[in-house]
Image: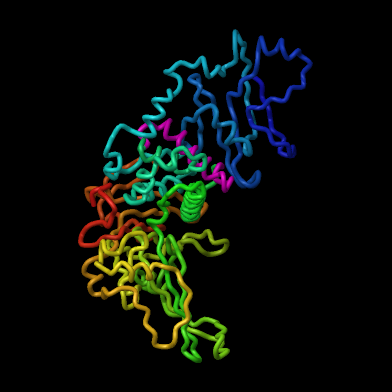
């Protein structure tokens, strides 16, 4: 057994599998007789010697790596471990091996069909022989915790349970599957299809997801806990960029993030002359302060409350204005982020109780008219005139004379109140004292109306009352799906409502 200790003062970066030769043994002779194989790694995760923890990886006889982290054990492929420990490895253990013919690694051409995927098997994995692959019932995924990855598991659980979100990905697989830029799209599709049935293969797949995310943020390769909200923002941004890369290739592609997008219009009224300036911006979620009244509706009202702001009027040189926000278009999926962390450093958990309704109406936040859905033809739910609705969807920044009314639809709020609403279908909750000391879980609404409690790989049935009670102090991200006339607005039947 050969023990190698990494000197932290050495700034040269090596992968744990590298052995620097210093002996004078003839390389050809050593190559033909013996070598050292990496069999164990002790890694330090943290910012300093006193602030962090140690994890270990050991090589099993089967060739799989066994990772031990705070009582949790996961299996990984041999090729992955040296890469993910490149920055955190502290002690390396190499065992002497005698080579009879060749090292452990094999010529790819000599690997039998049972040891590797055939092209046909790989093709079958990407395109299952099922004409109704987009009609798979909504189900909870059993996602392996690969080391402080609960933030990833809980967020993915809620996103991949959204029917319209996954439909956009699966229906366009023929467009993105051959693109080298669609790394995250491929990972999400495989996670959704496999469902995490096999623990070891799911662990490897989750590492692939983290590697895909690390292309833009290297911190996702480590084992340090991350914020679920920041992850979701990163997720959506990366999917948008992959979609942009596809469109730059001349492909007709609709990004799944569009299902979460909407526009908020702001009307700024000069308090001196009364002139108005309006503009609209696109969002994919809303971050809300916890209201003193203790309800989600009050938190939304607080966010859309009319505010007095500093403003330089080009007409009367006034310095103040009133700013009023309202929905310009509506999302098919409304994602709400509750600001549950504050205090010094912004990491302290705020367990202020907040009542979360199972059904949510936005009629009071839409002004005098009903805006169209952001990513759907408005006639599908309001019978509006198409040309009128198209104008309402366009982003603008326009000045209006006092008293001007911008007409975007002909349906009043009472009609919207009685025919449409948002249904709660997913919650990401944080259990713990602070951002750096806690655990994320998720709860999703199944296709048959059954709530499911998801804690990494553990999935168990729940009910609405329990879900709403648990999220009262711990709910962190909420996922609401738009419904009209008692059904989910959609392009086609992916899931039962």
Left or right of 62, for residue 421: left
As drawn, the residue found furthest toward the right would be: 24
- Of residues 43 and 401, the one drawn nearer to the viewer in this rendering: 401
Q: What residue do we see at 31% from left, 61% from top?
A: 377
Magenta-span inclusion, residue 189: no
Relative to 145, say whether 233 is above or below.
Answer: below
Please state the horizontal and vertical placement of residue 75, each as a whole percent of the image.
47, 30
Q: Quadrant of residue 87?
A: top right
- Of residues 143 and 264, the one drawn nearer to the viewer in this rendering: 264
Left or right of 354, for residue 115: right
Predominant secondary structure in magenta?
A: helix
Please state the horizontal and vertical placement of residue 5, each as a whole percent of the image.
69, 30
Q: How is the image coloured?
A: rainbow
Relative to 357, say whether 147 is above or below.
Answer: above
Please state the horizontal and vertical placement of residue 443, each as a whole percent of the image.
33, 50
Magenta-span inclusion, residue 202: yes
Q: What residue do we see at 62% from left, 19% from top?
A: 95
Q: Quadrant of residue 340?
A: bottom left
Please state the horizontal and vertical placement of residue 58, each as a whole percent of the image.
54, 27
Whether residue 192 appears in this view of the structure is yes
Q: Quadrant of the N terminus?
A: top right
Q: What residue do we see at 56% from left, 36% from top?
A: 55
Whether residue 437 appears in this view of the structure is no
As drawn, the residue found furthest toward the top would be: 100
Q: Which residues are magenta?
A: 196-222
């Amino acid at each position: 057994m050969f023990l190698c200790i990494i000197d932290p003062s050495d700034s040269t970066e090596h992968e744990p599998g590298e052995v620097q030769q210093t002996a004078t043994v003839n390389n050809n002779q050593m190559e033909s007789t013996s070598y050292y194989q990496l069999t164990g790694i002790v890694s330090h995760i943290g910012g300093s010697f006193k602030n962090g923890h140690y994890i270990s990886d050991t090589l099993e006889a089967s060739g799989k790596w066994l990772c031990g982290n705070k009582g949790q054990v996961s299996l990984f492929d041999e090729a992955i471990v040296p890469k993910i420990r490149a920055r955190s490895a502290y002690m390396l253990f190499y065992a002497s091996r005698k080579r009879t013919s060749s090292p452990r690694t094999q010529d790819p051409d000599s690997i039998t069909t049972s040891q590797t995927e055939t092209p046909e098997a790989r093709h079958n994995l990407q395109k299952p022989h099922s004409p109704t692959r987009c009609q798979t019932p909504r189900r909870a995924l059993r996602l392996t915790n690969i080391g402080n990855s609960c933030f990833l598991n809980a967020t993915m659980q809620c996103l991949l349970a959204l029917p319209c979100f996954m439909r956009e990905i699966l229906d366009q697989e023929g467009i993105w599957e051959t693109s080298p830029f669609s790394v995250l799209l491929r990972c999400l599709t495989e996670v959704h299809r496999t469902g995490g049935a096999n623990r070891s293969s799911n662990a490897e797949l989750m590492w692939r997801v983290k590697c895909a995310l690390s292309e833009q943020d290297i911190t996702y390769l480590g084992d340090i806990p991350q914020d679920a909200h920041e992850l979701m923002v990163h997720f959506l941004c990366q999917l948008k960029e992959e979609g942009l890369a596809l469109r730059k290739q001349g492909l007709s592609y609709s990004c799944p993030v569009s299902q979460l997008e909407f526009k908020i219009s702001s009307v700024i009224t000069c308090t001196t002359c009364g002139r108005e300036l309006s503009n609209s911006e696109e969002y994919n979620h809303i971050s809300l302060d916890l209201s003193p009244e203790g309800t989600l509706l009050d938190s939304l009202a607080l966010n859309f409350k009319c505010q007095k702001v500093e403003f330089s009027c080009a007409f009367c040189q006034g310095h103040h204005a009133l700013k009023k926000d309202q929905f310009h278009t509506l999302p098919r999926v409304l994602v709400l982020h509750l600001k549950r962390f504050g205090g010094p450093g912004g990491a302290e958990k705020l367990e202020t109780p907040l009542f979360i309704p199972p059904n949510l109406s936005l009629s009071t936040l839409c002004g005098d008219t009903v805006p169209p859905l952001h990513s759907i033809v408005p006639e599908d739910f309001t019978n509006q005139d198409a040309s009128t609705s198209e104008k309402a969807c366009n982003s603008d920044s326009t000045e209006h004379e006092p008293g001007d009314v911008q007409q975007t639809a002909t349906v009043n709020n009472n009609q919207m109140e009685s025919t449409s609403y948002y249904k709660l279908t997913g919650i990401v909750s944080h259990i713990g004292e602070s951002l750096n000391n806690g655990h994320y879980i998720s709860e999703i609404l199944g296709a048959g109306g059954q709530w499911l409690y998801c804690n990494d790989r553990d999935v168990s049935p729940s009910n609405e009352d329990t879900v709403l009670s648990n999220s009262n102090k711990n709910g962190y991200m909420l996922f609401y799906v738009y419904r009209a006339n008692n059904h989910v607005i959609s392009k086609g039947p992916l899931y039962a409502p």
